[in-house]
Image: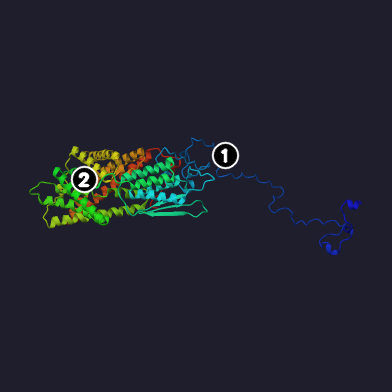
Amino acid sequence: MAERQRGEAPEDRKPQSDEARSAFTPPLGVPLPPPPEDEHPTSEFAVPEGIAPEPPGEPEGSAFTLPAGTVAPDSSTTQSTLLPGYTPPYGMPKVSLTKDTPWQDRMRTMLRMPVGERPAPERATKQDEPGPPVPRILDLTLRIGELLLAGGEGAEDVEAAMFGVAHAYGLHRCEPTVTFTLLTVSYQPSLVDDPVTANRTVRRRGTDYTRLDAVFRLVHDITSQGLTLEEAYRRLAEIRRNRHPYPGWALTAASGLLAGAASMLVGGGLVVFLAAAAGAMLGDRLAWLAAGRGLPEFYQFVAAALPPAAMGVALSALHGYVDVQASAVITGGLFALIPGRALVAGVQDGLTGYYITAAARLLEVGYLIAGIVCGVLIVLYGGVHIGGATLNPGAALERVERPGVQIVAAMLLSFAFALLLQQERHSVWVVTLNGGVAWVVYGALADTAGLDPVPATAISAGLVGLFGQLLSRYRYASALPYVTAAIGPLLPGSAVYFALLNFAKNELNTGIASLTKAAALALAIAIGVNLGSEMARMFLKVPGEAAGRRAAKRTRGF
């Protein structure tokens, strides 16, 4: 019974066979031999006897924990107190983009951030609701970007508008791309999902700043007030259906007023005003006729440049009967044709890093100026070498200081330019005043202070860009309507005419010098406008703490 209580079976008391015993097991009753001295049953990494163990090292901490002796930052800590170029131990600060600032600044700030650091949209979908309709959102984004790009807006502002629309409807992992004629937007739901990409090509470009302002207001309402897709599509359709604010005859009269005011700006009188206006209006009608026949813009500019040049050559041939400054007539006609809007937009894209779009815009400007050159040179060559016209560049270079008349002429020029750009009526008078201020500053620097025309033009254009940016931020609109027409009095019309006249007289060196001066003045206008706009952004409130991060720096060309 005892054996059974101990759980031993009867078979367990039987002696085991020799096969069941190990060959290395000593027999029963024989003690185990001591282990040899050369064997060490301990680990090879154990510390030998008589040696003190090393003190334990400091435990490894997380990259996001504060070091010993560091005070945790409070809400008043800003990123400017940190070392530049290093991620703080408590992580990147939270991005706070309030809706009190214009959407251009908010979206431009997010557009310049990496995708992983952009804050998610504020609109959160419920669990029982489906996700955002990605194809419709991308289509709306492309249509809005198309209207902005066709209206002459800069590539950075177009991308900011497209990103703002997509972000407002819940597509935070969205990347818009803008080139001269192609718009592309790509959305990737997550790192494991396939991206959705759509693009749109801009076939036609027109100048209608009233429509441009309406699109800016639409983007502002989408990003700030949360319009639904149906409401956004309805307002976009209304914008596209709206007619131009001014009829065709008003635009023709505005082109004549612009040319006449420009001729008075360079020293012309009443007869010169009427002659320049008549030539510009005739050239405008010829350009409309060429556009109606489907001719490219190059030939439209050739047709528009013919009548003003012919009017000036005809008056020069009648110098014995009529004492008229013919050069001022041709210069006034050229003021209405110089593509200042495309030039400013091209230089602005280059300064903001959109080099492909900038190169395309500047190439377009080159082609349009080549069309003007062809049209004017045909008439000048025929008038100088065949008709016997006496056009004297030296007489035309004599500046007549008439401050009162020139200020009025500059304001009339800006007013007519604003009408040609199809601006809203409430912004025309603001642009007119801005153009007058620009000419006053230029006259004070160039005529009174004796400053070189190139830096004087750059400073005046900088003030125009600064005022335009401030007005655009006040009205939550585009800066182009307040800038483009105001730089009209600063355009290098006379320098272009002198270059063409010297080319027609086979004086290449003098012509190249005048053309170089015209190019320098044009670049001074574009750089001054862009610099004024950036100064406005520099000194005004910047949304969010992430906007304070420094931009990428490139040194010594690499």
Quadrant position of residue 540: top left
Please rate how many residues cluster around mark 2, counting C-alpha atoms within 10 Å: few if below 14, some from 14 to 19, many from 20. Answer: some
Task: Please name the amino acid that badge 2 sits on.
Answer: Ala
Label 2 to label 1: alpha-carbon separation: 76 Å
Left or right: residue 206 versus residue 308 is right
Q: Judge whether 514 appears above or below 448 on screen.
A: below
Residue wearing tag 2:
253
Location of residue 82 in the rendering, given as x and y in whole percent from the top left corner: 48, 40
Residue 160 visible: no
Report helix, strand or loop for mark 2. Answer: helix
Location of residue 257 in the rendering, given as x and y in whole percent from the top left corner: 20, 44
Location of residue 349 in the rendering, given as x and y in whole percent from the top left corner: 35, 49
Report helix, strand or loop for mark 1. Answer: loop
Who is closer to the viewer here, 415 or 341? 415
Task: Please name the amino acid that badge 1 sits on.
Answer: Ala
Residue wearing tag 1:
68
Quadrant position of residue 210: top left
Who is closer to the viewer here, 416 or 388? 416
What colour scheme governs how the chains and residues are painted in the rendered image of this protein?
A: rainbow
- In this view, the residue farthest toward the left is 320
